[in-house]
Image: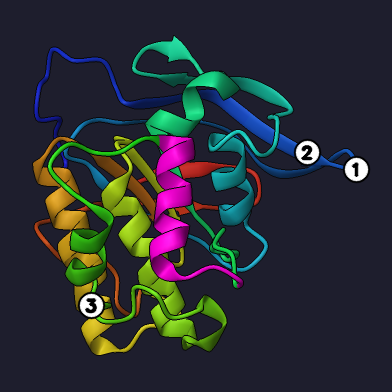
């Protein structure tokens, strides 16, 4: 989707002159872009172009070297992140000693609960019905990724930052990610995702952003 659901609403996410340096070497930027409700944006780039670093900056895990990040028109603060931004990275942020159900309940305690859904329903939606109480360490890599996807369904965050969400998933799992993105966009959320493109989101005509070492260009 290329246009906001409500053209009068501020951007869910706005980056202004954003840049990140490591040991005085530029990783990305400066760059500026916006995401509105209903946007699903694919961020593409070679290894080392800064895709993962950018998501960490946008989620508050790293502080930008320069520039500004706005959420719903207001400066990003750590206090606002847990309920407004959901990050799914290479490290899934789930605990191996807990069951899927326990992990989801822990996530609710931090990020809140979206109206109209329960942990059991979220697990069923991602194909993990019957695995609620199985220790996470006994699950496959793909099943662990599904637990992390169930967490996205639960929390009320309008902005999803997804780093290679198709990794470790079979064809059915890839379709699941696309359906979740479609649902999130339809209810007014936005998503910025990295992907090598093999199974990237295909609904409508999503905006694509090419990230290079020192600049960003949107198609």
Q: Give the range drawn in magenta.
A: 97-111
Question: Which residue is painted at 49% across and 37% down in the image?
Answer: 110
Specify which label sits upstream in the sequence, 3 or 1: 1
Instruction: Assess whether residue 101 is covered by the magenta stretch.
Output: yes
Residue closest to the far front: 133
Q: Percent from the top left, x then y, of residue 156?
A: 29, 36
Specify which label sits upstream in the sequence, 2 or 3: 2
Q: Write down the residue under mark 3.
A: 129
In this rendering, position of residue 114 left or right of residue 152: left
Q: Percent from the top left, x then y, of residue 87?
A: 48, 48
Q: Write down the residue under mark 1.
A: 23
- Tag 1: Cα neighbours inside 10 Å, few (<14), some, or many (≥20)? few
Q: Is 117 placed above or below 34 here?
A: below
- Tag 3: Cα neighbours inside 10 Å, few (<14), some, or many (≥20)? few
Question: Which residue is painted at 19% across and 47% down in the image?
Answer: 184
Look at the numbered disc 1 and give the secondary structure of its residue: loop
Quadrant housing residue 128: bottom left
Quadrant housing residue 201: bottom left
Cβ–Cβ under 8 Å for marks 1 and 2:
yes
Q: Write down the residue under mark 2.
A: 21
Q: Is 117 placed above or below 119 here?
A: above
Q: Which of marks 3 and 1 is in front?
A: 3
Q: Nearer the viewer, residue 111 or 109?
A: 109
Q: Nearer the viewer, residue 127 or 105?
A: 105
Q: Distance between the residues labelled 3 and 1?
A: 47 Å
């Amino acid at each position: 989707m290329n246009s906001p659901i409500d053209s009068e609403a501020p951007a869910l996410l706005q980056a202004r002159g954003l840049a990140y340096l490591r040991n005085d070497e530029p990783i990305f930027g400066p760059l500026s872009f916006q995401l509105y409700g209903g946007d699903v944006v694919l961020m593409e780039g070679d290894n080392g172009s800064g895709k993962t670093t950018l998501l960490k900056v946008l989620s508050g895990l790293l502080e930008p070297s320069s520039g500004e990040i706005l959420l719903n028109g207001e400066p990003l603060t750590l206090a606002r992140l847990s309920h407004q931004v959901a990050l799914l990275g290479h490290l899934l942020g789930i605990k191996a000693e807990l069951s899927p159900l326990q992990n989801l309940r822990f996530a609710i305690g931090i990020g809140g609960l979206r109206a109209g859904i329960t942990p059991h329903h979220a697990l069923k939606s991602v194909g993990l019905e019957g695995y609620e109480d199985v220790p996470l360490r006994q699950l496959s890599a793909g099943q662990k990724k599904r637990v992390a996807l169930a967490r996205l369904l639960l929390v009320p965050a309008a902005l999803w930052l997804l780093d290679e969400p198709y990794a470790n998933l079979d064809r059915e799992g890839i379709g699941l990610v696309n359906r979740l993105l479609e649902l999130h966009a339809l209810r007014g959320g936005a998503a910025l995702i990295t992907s090598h493109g093999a199974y990237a989101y295909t609904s409508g005509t999503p905006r694509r952003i090419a990230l290079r070492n020192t600049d960003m260009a949107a198609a």
